Amino acid sequence: MKFFKKKAFFIKSFFLHLFLSIVVIALSWSLIEPNAYNFMVKSFVATQSGSSDIAVIVIDDKSIAYHRWPWPREYYAQMMEFLNTYSKPKLIGYDAIVTTLDKDNPKSDKYFFDTIKKIPNVVVGFSPLQQPYESQADAEYDKKFREKFDVNIKLNYTPYDFGRYKSISKFPEPYFNAVKQTGSVNVTQNSNGYLTYMDQVVSVNGHYYPSLGLRMYLALNDTQDVTVNTDNITVDKTGLQIPAVANSKGIQNLIKYYKLSDTAYTHKKYSAIDVIKSLELIKQGKKPIINPSEFDNKIIFVGANAKAAALGLEDALSTPIEQKHPGVDIQATNLDNLINNEFLRQTGFFTDLAILVAISILTFVIISKFTFFASLALLILVAAFYMVFSMVCYQSGIAVNVITPLAIQLLTTIFGYSYRFLLEGKNKEKIKQAMGKYLSQDIMKNVVQNIDDIKLGGKRAIVTVLFADIRGFTSMSEKMTAEEVSVILNEYFTEIEPIITKYNGVINKFIGDAVMAIFGEPIQDMNHPQNAVKCAYEMLKTVDRLQDKWLFEGKPKIEIGIGINTGEAFVGNIGSEKRLEYTVIGDTVNLASRIESYNKVYKTNFLISSSTYSYVSSMADVIKISEVQIRGKAKKMDIYEVLRLS
């Protein structure tokens, strides 16, 4: 039975801890862990600059100051002409979406489209949209777009398509005809407003398209074959494996950010207007602001990011390393990750679960095996070790949960100590109950209340001492077995113990067949003489009842004698520092014992001293026994036989 109670208590505790852990994990993942992720990325991942082989050309504040927005498309054409004619870049990424024609400057449009058409190594951006096509003609564009720009993305499984994107931004026809390669520039921020994942592959009406960065990577390696597996995106030709997961936003992977430079970019940044002016200077035979050779054999991204937000030019998002991180630099970062095979890998569900379980078990073991201060020190070391472990993981490109395991450790610590406290409380209660069978419950209570002040010594106090002894116990024992005697004694003591407790008495000790009880200490009672006499009277009535029962059962008849005395005695702890006994000592105790012995002499059952009688004279009918010579006393004294209580 005890085993099952302990097991039930453990099971209840386990499920309570499990429930609280789930709550803590959910709150940590949604409220704390994203901020911890940002901190770890900024502190331990973004420690090196982006590749020097990638640069960005940006339409920035300096460029807008040169010419008001919107720019004529001839400016974009001039940037492309500079890169294509005078430089030799590996690849150009155009991080912009062209959806309309400039009706006021058709020549400017034609210049731009013709320039784009001449460049074999440019990849432009497109945007998948959530709203469906408005007409059948627009829907036909979807098919036309897929036929020209589709790459071979093969799925080894069928991810659930949430149908987020239902259409594609529509290129003007001359731009559509000029463009050779395109990739999605869409990115999605998390619920906390930070861009941590790259939408590497997006689904539009059940068809899959690569991001701008992935499309540029495929172009660099002259391939269009991509395989999407359950845990990665694989470029078949190069063997590149991008750790990715599918969700409602697409097939995404964590972005590994680089260290920001003084320009607030992670890759080398050039102002668009400087490129345009350099083209003009070259054509004039003058020295350009930017030497075209700076772009030789490099990958160039062209985009816009100016603070003129009202004009729609501020293309910046919150990332773990910067509140306003330029979008063109984010696109460059994505390609940088792909080229250098540098990714952050998020630990999987089972890995996270294993860490949490290990932390919980280790914490519980430490709490259960060590003292409070030792376990506290070890738990702090475990937490510190996990923090160091997390730092090393992030530096190695593995994104682990940082706060959640520590939150679970804290919860387990609180829960473990609570469980330990309850368990120790239960054990202490069991010990108290067990010791209460050897000591009076009141003495036990007194010890517990003064647990820090237990010592030898005590005080002098007025108490009433009661002795009760079985008549003829020795001769009865000789006629019965030890087991039979113990049965009678146990039944007798079981009956009288609650009577003594009822009248605020404390059983001090059992002496063979005798009982010594104290009234007035440690239970404070102003009427202890009266209560002691009432207790003795009820004890005698109880023995009368037991005699009838024992006679019916064929057991011997027993009689008891009771002696009571009231007076001053020493009350407290006696013994040694290692072994104490709470008792009363003094002449008052000795006299009570000797008065009880006179029951044999006078054939009585209930005798009290004159000092006790002085307290109960109004309630007790007595017979006075005058001038009794008490052993150990020089003078004779009166004692009283109590006949009845009125």
Image (spheres, helix red, strand yellow):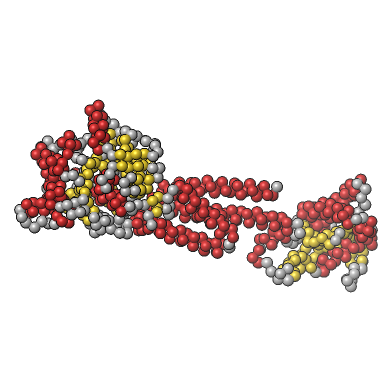
Residue at 89 percent of width and 47 percent of height: 549
Residue at 57 percent of width and 57 percent of height: 365
Whether residue 621 is visible, yes or no, is no
- In x, y percent, where is residue 134? 25, 29
Residue at 32 percent of width and 59 percent of height: 47
As drawn, which residue projects farthest toward the bottom? 634
As drawn, which residue projects farthest toward the left? 284
- In x, y percent, where is residue 429? 67, 55
- In x, y percent, where is residue 102? 13, 38
Drawn side of residue 541 relative to residue 308, left or right: right
For residue 584, above or below residue 173: below
Task: Name the image quarter holding residue 643.
Answer: bottom right
Task: Name the image quarter holding residue 423.
Answer: bottom right
Foreground residue among 528 and 443: 443
Foreground residue among 506 and 375: 375
Foreground residue among 184 and 493: 184
Drawn side of residue 526 relative to residue 89, left or right: right
Residue at 33 percent of width and 49 percent of height: 240
